[in-house]
Every structure is written in structure tokens, then in C-alpha cells.
Image: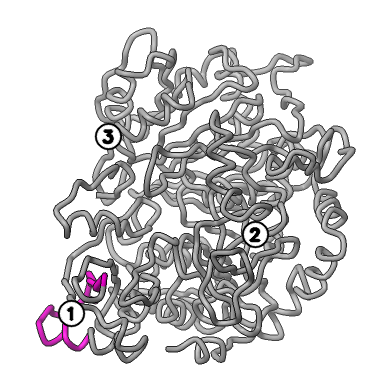
Amino acid sequence: MNNEQESQEIYRPSAEVIAQANVKSYEEMARWAERDLEGFWAAQAEQFTWFQRWNKVLDDSNKPFYRWFTGAKTNIVYNCLDRHLTTWRRNKLALIWEGENGDLRTFSYHALHREVCRFANVLRSMGVRKGDRVTIYMGRVPELPIAMLACAKIGAIHSVVYGGFSVEALHGRIEDSQSNVCITCDGSFMNGKIVELKRIMDEALKRSPTVEHVIVFKRTGHDVPMEQGRDYWWHELMALPITRAAPGSNRNDTEILDAEDPLFMLYTSGTTGKPKAILHTHGGYTVGVGTTLRAVFDLKEEDRWWCAADPGWITGHSYIVYGPLLLGATSFMYEGAPTYPYPNRWWSMVEKYGINVLYCAPTAIRGLMRFGEAWPNRHDLSSLRLLGTVGEPINPEAWRWYYRVIGRERCPIMDTWWQTETGMFMITPLPVMDLKPGSATRPFPGVQADVVDEQGQPVAPGEEGYLVLKTPWPAMLRTIYRDPDRYVQQYWSKYPGMYFTGDSARKDKDGYFWIIGRVDDVIKVSGYRLGTAEIESALVSHPAVAEAAAIGLPHEVKGNAIHAYVILKAGQEPSDALAETLKAHVGHELGPIARPEKITFVPQLPKTRSGKIMRRVLRARALGLPEGDVTTLEE
């Protein structure tokens, strides 16, 4: 499908969706933010509680080290938990959790607050103070958000490492953060197997002299080694008298922090170099995350919200843990794999718990598409009213399937573009907007984005270029922990005054953004630049294909030739004839220049645990080169 066709395919929201939307007009909200950026964000900040108001909304005196709500005193945990306890929400469900084996646990706002206070006192008793770093390496259990919130409550900085990263990845992150307390599980369940989290932690700590204490939550109950004097069971610590505040004491108090005090650091693994510790702060992050969740996913008091990510990624930080609690919402969390024990696990839980809003990754949608429509069709999905995607551009074919089969053509899809670095949605629809399959639509009000050429000049509509952000935003990263020079070099040096996202994109005549992918995921064939996402999208639009990855390999005539790796849908058989059919299909969709040189059928693709395809690993394997850092690989 060419650019012109893409920009013509439009899905309009129903009158019912428009009538109940929290934001009635995107244009009005965007004009307000354009007219008065600081006034706009100050008004959004009013929905939260501040111990002391700011004296300046945006301090840009030391660019690019921007500061938001300077002079203000707050704590995100006060806004997530404490303030709800004086309202009817005290007894509202904050969290519903289902384990992979069917376990069910629920927490009201009162109960969640109690657990967070108790664990905060455990951390205090271990000497954790404001500014200390705590590494959290756990499965998807309620104790993970409890640990995050307890750190934030006392002003400690949490560093969550995805539960399943390798020894090397975990060790590097503990070492860089200089944590002296780590929190883990004996193990976690995934696809019916135990992930050995405690043993991985033990290996990582053999070379981490800063760590004094390890707290272990018992999830699986299988035997794990416990080192005397260093390792402690979560449940034993939580039963001690230290966790309960005496009447009149201040042991349950939430630390009063500066708006710019660090909240958390989260490592991103770029394609080269060591992982970067992205630092976020209490005040601006609160405003950005709470505002975007309310406007984009239109959350209502009675909604049940399910962000199917992992708290170990930025999506989980912003929209499993902090965002929903800031709004006093009811959040659902699931421990295990989407297809365990059968490919209807997600759809059965949507039906069982009456989920209203589902937010997940395109890679999960494509994975579930492989199993056909019969699995979702056996479930009542009528509780759903909004859908969302995150993590990578969604190809139009998967978008239409999600809209038609899961949303039953009733549920607008909020296709969100943002990053670990941005902290919040940056380019995204609102429910009242017209949608185009595969487009992230327009910048969120208050965000100025553009597509520019090598010289930083805006490109014409339909032309590909570099995606940049032209104004600061509240939830933005403040720096790279212990490496401010890298922060400036990586994000602010290519185009002075503009934040360089590292993504390529194009903008159509209606101002809708089409994210193509990482700049380093571009293949140059005979002088033409082709985005891997476009080639993969063309392949997936063929009815036989479930998922695809494209890479460029050296070619003596063209410079590079396209090699594609394809996972077929259930019931499809690989053959030379099908490979030729797929090559022709891509040529028809994108033009002869994009026709793959070779197609290889594979059972799976190398992916990070957040679902992003690691094309550099495919390239290294094809060329017989070292694969580099593969600590973030799922397999």
C-alpha cells in the first residue's frame, strides 16, 4: 500500500465514544498548549497534590538539562496512594493479579498502601535512605510494584531489571547503579516453567561488592540457596514488628521531596555501547504520565485497565504502576505468557475480569494472530471499549485484525509512540480522533514533533526523515545517570535545540506521523533508503505470514540486498514456491526495489523481552560475525 493510500484509509470514532471522552477536542487542547505551553502544563499539574507549589513551571536556563516545577515539593507515592485513602477510593480495588497457574490476589488502595508502608519500613531498617539505589529483579508479581512504590516513598531510587535478563545484564546494571540492596524472587513462572531468578542474582552478585542485602520473595517455593547474613525472606521481614508504625509515630510518612529529586533509573540497551541509565524525577513524571493516561485511554472510575507489559520496562513503570494509581484506577496484572496453556489465555481473562481497556505490543498481537480467529471468538469480549498498542510501529494488517477480531469494530486503537527516555506518550491518538491503521497520528498536546532532513530542515509531506522533538515536556529524562556528557551527545548534539529520537518517520498531508523504525534499521538498496518496518509490514500483509524481519546484507551490485526471515501462520507450509510468491508480493506492495533477494522460513525470531526484533543479531549470524551483547534476548 503506498503512502497516498495509507493516508486515505480512515476509521472514525462512534458518537458514543465521542460523547463519553474525557477530552472532547484534540484541536482545542493542542491550540491551548501551543498558545501557552507553561500555562497548559501548570493546569495539568493542578490535578495532583503538592506539599509546596512551584515557583517556575519550566526552567530552561541550563539547556538541555531542563527542570520542571522548580521549587515544588511532592512525592509520586503520596499522589498514587496516600491521597486516595481520605476518599471513597480507600476500599476500591487498586490491583487485580492472576498468576500463570491461576492464583488470584487483589489489593484495595488501603491494602496496597499498608503493604507499601510495611516494605518501606523494611528498607529503612536496612539503612536505605533518600538517594540510595535499589535494584529490583523480579517476576510479574504484586510485590514488584510494592517494592517500586516503597523505594519512591522513602526517596530511594529504584532500578528495575527485567526478570529474565541474564547474569551479565543484571551484574552490569547493579554495578553501574552502585546498589547496596537488591530485591528478587526465588523464581517466577513463564510458560509453565520456573525462571531461576535467585540463582541468576547469586551469580551476578559474585562480582558486585556494593550489595549488602538481598530480599527474596517466595513465589515458586522451590529450593534456592540463601546466604547467611546477606539474604532475607520477604515474608519473614514483613512479619517483624519494624513494619508496623506505632500510634503517633512518623514511620508511615511519605518523604517530602523536591519535584526534581530522582524517582527511578531504567536502563536501555542501545545497539552499541553499554546500556544507558535513563533518570526520571518525581514532579514532571507525575504530571506527564497522569495527564497522558487520562486523556489517551480515557480512564473512568469504573474501568478495569490492563497494560499487558512488564513492570521491568518503561511501559510497565508508567502505565502499570504509576499512571493508573495516580488516577485512582483499577489495574489488572498477569504473571505469565499470553499463550499458556492455550492461545486464548488473554481473551479468557478479558472475559473473566471484565477488562475495559487493553494495551499491549504489536508483537503480541501478531503472535496471537497466528492461531486464527477461533480462539478469541469463543470469548465474550464485549466489556472492551478501547484498545492500545506500544513498543514498535504496528503494521496495518495487524491493526485491522486487532480492530475487527478483538475490538469487534467498536473499539478505537490508541497506537502510541514514545520511549524510555520520554517517560510518557508523545505521538498518539485521542479517542475522539480519526484513525489511520499504522499511524501514531498526531503529537500529544504540548508536544512539538517534526520530521527533518540531515540539515535539520522539515521535509515535505510523505518524505522520510528523522523524527525530532522541538520542545521540552514534563516527563522527559533529566540525564543519563553518572554520564551527563553522553546525555548531551546522544540526544541533543545532532540537531542543536532539538531532541533527536533516533527514529525515522514521515508525516502525511494531514499531519499524521508514520513511524518507520530506528534509524539504524534502514537498508540502503541501490541508493534507495528502505525502512525494515515497511518491508516487514508488506510481508505480514500476505495471508500466509504471521511475522517477519528484514535485514540488509552486502551485495556487489546494489550495495545491500534485502534478506527476510518469515514465521508462517498455523497451517501454512514453507516452500520455494511460497518464497517466490512472497518476494513478488513485497515487490507489488512497495515497488521492485524492495523485492527481497532471499526469504528464509524460521520458527522464531531473536527478540528482546519487550518484543522488539533484534535485527543486528540476524545480520551478525548471516555474516558469521560475533553477535555482541545478547543479554536482552528472550531466548
Is residue 618 shown left or right of residue 144? left
Residue 231 in picture, x, y percent from top left: 38, 16
**Was residue 569 drawn as part of the magenta stretch in this picture?**
yes
Looking at the image, how many numbered discs can be counted on the residues?
3
Q: What element carries label 3?
A: loop
The answer to which quarter of the image holds residue 405 is bottom left
Identify the amino acid type marked 2. Leu
Q: Residue 571 carries which label?
A: 1
Q: Name the residue under label 2.
A: 469
Q: Give the range drawn in magenta.
A: 559-582
Q: Where is residue 9 in the image (x, y as percent from the top left)?
A: 54, 90
- Which element type, helix, strand or loop, lies under badge 1? loop
Judged left or right of residue 579, residue 20 is: right
Look at discs 2 and 3 and give the one toward the viewer.
2
**Image coordinates for residue 211, horizontal then vertical, percent:** 42, 16
The answer to which image quadrant residue 145 occupies is: top right
Q: Which residue is drawn at 56% across and 19% down?
A: 123
Q: How far apart are marks 2 and 3 (CA)?
A: 41 Å
Marks 3 and 1 sit apart, C-alpha to C-alpha, by: 34 Å
Residue denoted by label 3: 196
